[in-house]
Amino acid sequence: MKLNAKKSAQFKVIFEPGKEGGYTVHVPALPECVGEGKTVEEAMVDIQKAVARYYLKTLRSENGKDRCYDG
């Protein structure tokens, strides 16, 4: 069975300038999720992917499937 439901959530994100340029971004509510990018926009896309991977990993482990997911 394939689900096509889309859910969204909002999280506070914190951007920090990198020492050598670019940005690092993290989600205080999800300390495992960190992203980075040369621009704020790239960092935002990266953190969105990190959050999606986190939730996919969580769903897979809750369903008794693979506990590790690399992307």
Image (cartoon, helix red, strand yellow):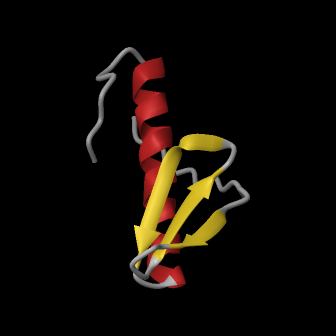
| Residue at screen point 53% across, 81% down | 40
Q: Quadrant of residue 56?
A: top left
Q: Is residue 7 above or below residue 22?
A: above
**Where residue 10 sits in the image (x, y, percent)?**
72, 58
35 with respect to 13 (left or right): left
Judge by depth and name the residue closer to the eye, 52 or 35: 35
Q: Quadrant of residue 57?
A: top left
| Residue at screen point 48% across, 54% down | 34
Callout count: 0
**Where residue 37 sits in the image (x, y, percent)?**
41, 75
Q: Is residue 68 above or below residue 50?
A: above
Judge by depth and name the residue closer to the eye, 65 or 27: 27
**Where residue 25 sits in the image (x, y, percent)?**
55, 64
| Residue at screen point 69% across, 54% down | 9
**Residue at the front extreme, as displayed:** 19
Q: Quadrant of residue 68?
A: top left
**Where residue 69 sits in the image (x, y, percent)?**
29, 35
Q: Is residue 10 above or below residue 68?
A: below
4 with respect to 65 (left or right): right
Which quarter of the image is occupied by the N terminus?
top left
Judge by depth and name the residue closer to the eye, 5 or 63: 63
| Residue at screen point 32% across, 20% down | 65
61 with respect to 31 (left or right): left
